[in-house]
Amino acid sequence: MMPSSSIPWRRSSYSNGMGGECLEMAALAGVIAVRDSKVISGPQLTLSAATWKNFIGTIAQTTGRIN
């Protein structure tokens, strides 16, 4: 995986900007990287594109919204 500083991270639009619950993701070559934006040097979870799609679909079904 690329060094964290060179990865194009995207923060959830539901993040409140006040240090609240923030999830960041980055689409890389064939995988999706996920991290906690409050711990940017911490661990990263790497998911296949299919697993990420399932994850997002489950959130959409559970909450009735997705962004």
Image (cartoon, rainbow, N blue to C red):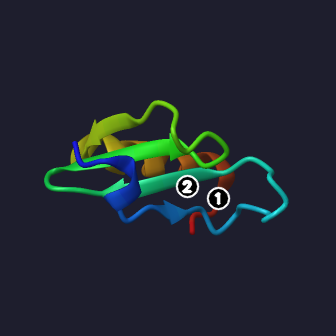
Image point 34% across, 50% down: which residue? Answer: 53
Residue type, numbered disc 2 = Ala
- Name the amino acid, label 1: Gly
Quick check: 15 above or below 55? below
Please give the name of the residue rendered at 23% of the width and 56% of the height, measured from the top-left corner.
Answer: 28
Residue sitting farthest toward the left: 30
Compare residues 52 and 22 and report the one nearer the observer.
22
The residue labelled by disc 2 is 60
**32 shown above or below 66:** above
Question: Residue 35 or 58: which is nearer the viewer?
Answer: 35
Report whether 41 appears left or right of 15: left
Q: Where is the N terminus found, in terms of image quarters?
A: top left
Residue 17, percent from left and from top: 78, 65
Residue 37 higher or lower than 10, as above or below: above
Q: Position of residue 64 (x, y in %)?
A: 64, 58
What crowding class fits label 2: few (fewer than 14 Cα within 10 Å), some (14-19), or many (20 or more)? few
Image position, residue 13 (x, y; %): 64, 69
**Disc 1 + disc 2, Cβ < 8 Å:** yes
Q: Is residue 27 left or right of residue 24?
A: left
Locate residue 9 relative to residue 30 in the image: left or right.
Answer: right
Q: Position of residue 8 (x, y in %)?
A: 37, 65
Q: Which residue is mark 1?
A: 64
Residue nearer the viewer, 54 or 26: 26
| Quadrant in the picture for residue 51 | top left
Q: Residues within 10 Å of mark 1 (few under 14, many from 20)?
A: few
Secondary structure under tag 1 reads loop
- The quarter holding residue 67 reads bottom right
Q: Callout 2: helix, strand or loop?
A: helix
Q: Depth check: 2 or 47 in front?
A: 2
- Residue 11 left/right relative to 4: right
